Amino acid sequence: MRLQIGLATVAIFLAAGGYILWTETNGDGFPADIAYGNGQIEAVQVDIASMVAGRIETVMVREGDMVTPDQVVAIVDAEIIEAQLSQAEAQIAAAEAERAAAEARIGQMEALLALAQDEENRSRALVERGTSPQSNLDTLSTNVAVAEANLEAARAALLAHERAVDAARAAADQIATNLEDTELTAPTIGRILYRLVEPGEIITGGTRVMTMVDLSEVYLEFYLPATQAHRLAIGDEARIRLDVVDAVVPATVTFVSPVSQFTPRTVETADERQNLVFRIRARVPQELVEAYIDYVRTGIRGVAYVRLAPEPGQTPSDWPEELQLADFSDLPLPRN
């Protein structure tokens, strides 16, 4: 009987100890402030489109090729746009010639006004001496008013011609911009995903020429329940373990959704009773992505681990041994 009581007591202590150990971890050997969720490596897809209409002259890249920022990937035939630019430059020259003529007319009107004013002044002096009739002075005063009106009209015409020159230059600048847009370039570093046109095809403005994967920001999205997500902040350290490589990759939390959502069907949560989760994004350092750019693939599944803010009175846990960062200098990587 005493033996049975003793065994029962030992069992109770073991169960209590096991419960305490379980509550201090996630039930999977990790400390309670280490949370994780599964997801896949993702990057933004970018469409490279043509601003101008025309015939595709050359396509320089194929699906799967790596591209760098400002690398030319396709060219639209520019013959028509070059002709339009030549026409616009001729219109600029014509507008500048008209402006020069307007400037010359202003000089002419200023000279006529000065002459009319001199004649008016001489006539006024003669009228005051009584040697010239008042009618002559009235006529000359009218001539001065007409000359002043003509000068104002010439100045207004000059302003109109100057605006015409500005309009012609703006039209030429727009055509020159269209000419630059005939060379389609990659906006960032990435990999061509789809090649959508071939040389000789006629496209309209806004037509997609190809789609690329933007590798300037590679990340893994996963989900955490509200009980954990509120203890995570932008900039927190994260670590990623990929299914295809036995290594831990460093990452940084760059996004925490401000609103919750129902658990997606593709997400495996530690607590199946948790219906509402928050979307988290852990970004891989760009220098690491660029160092191993040939091996970066979207769609590779993995698990992201984050260290939550400690509860009041607790100290943050160290990263477990199995989540220590890999030495990438001698990491065996899969071949292309």
Image (cartoon, helix red, strand yellow):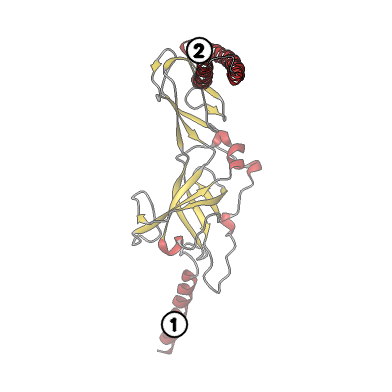
Q: Secondary structure at mark 2?
A: helix
- Tell me the tag on residue 81: none
Instruction: Determine which quarter of the picture holds residue 208.
Output: top left
For the point 48% across and 47% down, the residue is: 220
For the point 50% across and 35% down, the residue is: 214
Where residue 290 appears, x then y in whole percent? 60, 37
- Up-down relation of residue 90 to residue 223 (above or below): above
Could one spot residue 180 in this view of the protein?
A: no
Cα separation between marks 2 and 1: 104 Å
For the point 53% across and 73% down, the residue is: 312
User: Residue under circle 2?
Assistant: 91
Q: Nearer the viewer, residue 219 or 142?
A: 142
Could one spot residue 246 in this view of the protein?
A: yes
Q: Nearer the viewer, residue 9 or 43?
A: 43
Where residue 248 appears, x then y in whole percent? 56, 49
In the rendered structure, which amino acid carries the disc numbered 2?
Answer: Gln
- Label 2 or label 1, whichever lies nearer to me, is 2
User: Residue under circle 1?
Assistant: 7
Instruction: Determine which quarter of the picture holds residue 286.
Output: top right
| Few, some or many residues within 10 Å of mark 2 (<14, 14–19, 20+) | some
- Up-down relation of residue 232 to residue 174 (above or below): below
| Few, some or many residues within 10 Å of mark 1 (<14, 14–19, 20+) | few
Where residue 178 appears, x then y in whole percent? 49, 20
- Up-down relation of residue 330 to residue 186 (above or below): below
Where residue 152 appears, x then y in whole percent? 52, 22
- Up-down relation of residue 200 to residue 24 (above or below): above
In the rendered structure, which amino acid carries the disc numbered 1?
Answer: Leu
